Amino acid sequence: MTNRDGNLTSLWQDKARDFTSTLLPTERHYDVAIAGGGITGITTALLLQQSGKSCIVFESRNLCFGTTGGTTAHLNTFLDTPYPKLIKNFGKDAARTVARATREAIILVTELTSTLNIDCGFRETNGYIIAQTEEEVEELQSIHDACLDLGVDVAFISSLPTQIPARRILMLRNQAAINPIEYVHGLAQAFERAGGVVMQNCHVEDVDPGDKVRIETSQGTFYARSLVYATHIPPGINLLHLRCVPYRSYALAIRLKSNDYPEGLLYDMKDPYHYYRTQEIDGINYLIVGGEDHKTGSKSETDSSFRSLEDHVREHFDVKEITHYWSSQFFESVDGLPYIGTLPGHTDNILVATGYGGNGITHSQIAALTLRARLMTGEERYEGIFKPGRIKPVAGLPKFVQHNAGVAKQLLRKMVGLDELNGLDRLRPGEGAIVRLHDEKIAVCRDNDGMLHAVHPTCTHMGCTVVWNSAEQTWDCPCHGARYSMEGKVVNGPADKDLEQIILGEPVKGS
Ligand code: FES
């Protein structure tokens, strides 16, 4: 089993072994350094190394520790931001470019798995969007029309390859699915064979930009002509933190009594929507179901999200056993497209890829293609539509304002609620709360062995108050999605400093 950024174990993580790096760095100077060993970082590194650049990847923990190890790994030619909305926000030409980019993402995975012979359960299959109400039927019609207009291969069909009730079904041809960890490990091996270096347990501590970027890591100083942040969200404080909203999504891996596993990738049209697919691992089929998304930190009793998802699944499938429960994080951009290119406020040789929404695998491959073009030829692939510095349509702004208002309200509620939590005795194993102790706010949780852990609840990124996530047993920040272990260690950026630990039993100093 390999490690991931939470208490729960994903199906992929459970079945994978750790990647072992075979090449040690023989030098300190590279063309491109990549921070982050998830699917974006490793795919980008491989494409660049194959194109003649010398690359090094720094990963704070192990490959796929972050969201890559927790995704449900759908590859789609349609996105969470539907094409009618993209046409409205960006125009038809830009939406057509996005559609082309999604197709090229699937082609890239198809080619890499084939040419590198990666055994990652890659499967090309159809996708199905399911309308269950009259309103959804109407919306589906507009998605269908927009897809046809943009050259996305879709058709209405009359029956689904499963028993989920449907009024209308839109089929999307040539979608795909993979086991994300096996895919990344296969790419990483190819990267090393091509001469690239993967450094795990190597944290980027400081970056000094310039023609040669100086990168201080926990394993020494390195230099590169360019640096790519493939860390899901860039560290530090950046404009992109104000343009990305963190969400949690929940997933189950399920064995069915009937062995009647649905073929294809399935999506209903609820808000948040449910998504379903089948994956075979070691000769065993699993139905993977996801959904119940919510803003990070907007909910503390996250176990209830699993209960709702489980109830939903049992309505439609003959569940024999739920083998895995896990959740993961994604960042939604304000206008529905990812940010890929120069990190705002930085020189052209500091790059980033973030804001993938619920289409992380597809966007990771678009990012790798975009970044390769930028770093090899200076070309803005896809007409620069994914550039982080793009002028956004106004459509995204109200949503962002709403998010911030929601965060403020949530924080206020936490403050009001403090008086109710003036003791630690009511905390049961696996629970956490913000309480007052010696007139100070502290974040306290009790682990499964009954031991209390306490930290200052002020997020080290920009000072918001963290919220307990009962399912993953982490402290999550509602503002920009930083997450911390129960001992206060950073497990997800953008924060790069741990929460300050408090020794219980001694006077608590002010935060
Ligand atoms: Fe930005 Fe916590 S992640 S304040």
Image (cartoon, grey):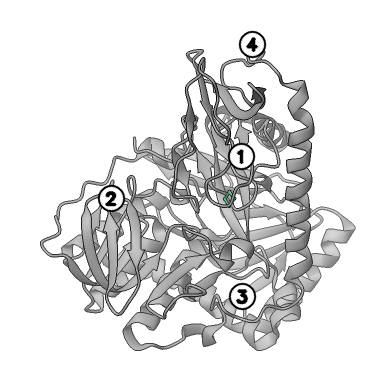
Left or right: where does residue 126 sit relative to residue 37? right
User: The C terminus is located in which quarter?
Assistant: top right
Q: Amino acid at mark 1?
A: Val
Badge 2 is on which residue?
202
Name the one closer to the observer, 320 or 502.
Answer: 502
Quarter holding the N terminus is: top left
Could you say whether the residue bearing mark 1 is in a helix, strand or loop? loop
Respond yes or no on whether mark 1 lies under 8 Å from ligand 1.
yes
Other-residue count near label 4 (Cα within 10 Å), few / some / many at <14 / 14–19 / ≥20: few
Mark 1 in CB contact with mark 4 (< 8 angstroms):
no
Position above or below: 52 against 434: below
Q: Which mark is residue 466?
A: 1
Answer with left or right where residue 509 lies relative to residue 130.
left
First reached walking from the N terminus: tag 3 or tag 2: 3
Is the residue marked by circle 1 packed among few (<14), some (14-19), or many (20+) residues within 10 Å? Answer: many
Task: Please name which of the two marks, 3 or 1, marks the residue nearer to the observer.
Answer: 1
Residue 253 visible in the shown view: no
Q: Which residue is mark 4?
A: 425
Residue hosting label 3: 153
How packed mark 3 is, by other alpha carbons closer than 10 Å (few <14, some 14-19, many 20 or more), is some
Q: Earlier in the sequence, mark 1 or mark 4?
A: 4
Asked if 202 appears above or below 367 in the picture, the reply is above
Residue 146, given in percent of the width and then of the height, sits at 73, 78
